[in-house]
Amino acid sequence: MKRRTLVLGGLAGAAGLTLVARPRDVGENHAPYFEKLAAALDQHQRAGPTLLIDAQKLQNNVRTLQQHINNRFAYRIVAKSLPSPDLLQRVMTLSGSQRLMLFHQPFINAVAERFPQADILLGKPMPVAAARNFYQRFKVGAFDPAAQLRWLVDTPQRLAEYELLAVERGTDMQICLELDVGLHRGGITSTDQMQAMLDTLQRSERLHFAGFMGYEPHVVKVPGNPLRYRDQAVDAYRVFVDTARQHLGSEWPEDAVLNCGGSPTYQLYDEGEFPFNELAAGSCLVKPTDFDLPSLADHEPAAWIATPVLKRSDSLHIPGIDLGPLQSLWNPNRERAFFTYGGYWKAVPESPQGLTTNSVFGRSTNQEMLNGSSTIDLQPGDWVFLRPTQSEFVFLQFGDIAVYNDGVITEDWPVLPENGPRAS
Ligand SMILES: Cc1ncc(COP(=O)(O)O)c(C=O)c1O
């Protein structure tokens, strides 16, 4: 073969490859559902970044959860993943559960005040100073911390610190022990350690053993068969419970809370005998993208970030060496640029479909650039919707949550306070 033919052949091959690899236009305009959300936001005079919850979808998710749990376990609502008192109230009403799992001292104070009937379990071991802050800020009312609040303790050291606090304040404290059932994020790792802590609890006049918490999200996250890891976690949990029952004998509390599970795993306990009596879950009720898991296939997304488009440009330009025209020549989905009110949240663009951030231009919490194809006909003032990757923390960034109900924003739900009032 002549050298020229080879070169031409090579060029043609490269051009063919180029045609194959060039991205196609994936842009679309809002589907009718998002058009309705946008109209509802306009009607409600929302004008900035807004966290929106679809009440109907939330309700569907609670029903789905109930069908799985099917009263075989008590259900504990993970409040950090649904961090708004009205949202919690809605889930409590729909599910009939008064059990809440909390992870942040100001939230404990706020929840104790708002839900005096609640049964609270801490989801992480709080520094003793945070526990002290809770009591200093606690407004005496119908909620009785000595009976309704279960602190979580992971080590003998923390147990000793809590004992001192209980004596100092002259208050009884309910104590649940954190178990390591395979996640390796702390917690008790051996029955010897557990028995020593149970002994301390038995000797204590102020601290009372109230149960266990063992969390096992690794079961569906690590590669391999989730049921194998589930069984290992369950076996570990069972050994702790059996040993504790034997150790305490008649002093085993009949109302012991034996907590397990989270959104990613709660459906793994639909059938069978398990050593715990309640399952915790929160995120699956709003389903951010981190929860797009096979184990949650029957839950539906129920929360979006909506934000107005401020500017539109029909061509892409980037300061300095302008790579914008090159980017859009190669990729039709980079033809247009839209700038939104705020951005850079833990979230991914959802509607209109085909929008992406531009890493060459950079990210912005003030005016984020999104690129899309010329199919996308967004104008300044229109809404863009993103799906949060997680609800925890993200929900706290937008002020009142807009509650969407069949075409209308029906309520505005304030979120929990990140910082409670200082003790006087
Ligand atoms: C102790 C504990 N239980 C349960 C959960 C599950 O929460 P979610 O259902 O929102 O994933 C978590 C989440 O971090 C947790 O830390």
Image (cartoon, rainbow, N blue to C red):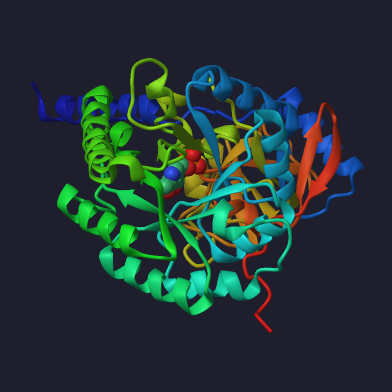
Q: Is residue 159 left or right of residue 79?
A: left
Residue 20: image location, x then y, percent: 37, 24
Q: Is residue 73 left or right of residue 95?
A: left
Q: Is residue 208 left or right of residue 76?
A: left
- Against 372, is 137 above or below? below
Residue 404: image location, x then y, percent: 79, 35
Report the residue at 73% width, 54% height from top: 114
Q: Is residue 32 left or right of residue 236?
A: right
Report the residue at 52% width, 45% height from top: 390
The residue nearer to you, when weighing 318 against 76, is: 76
Q: Residue furthest front?
A: 250
Q: Residue furthest left?
A: 1
- Against 11, is 64 above or below? above
Which quarter of the image is occupied by the C terminus?
Answer: bottom right
The residue nearer to you, when weighing 226 against 377, is: 226
Report the residue at 70% width, 52% height from top: 116
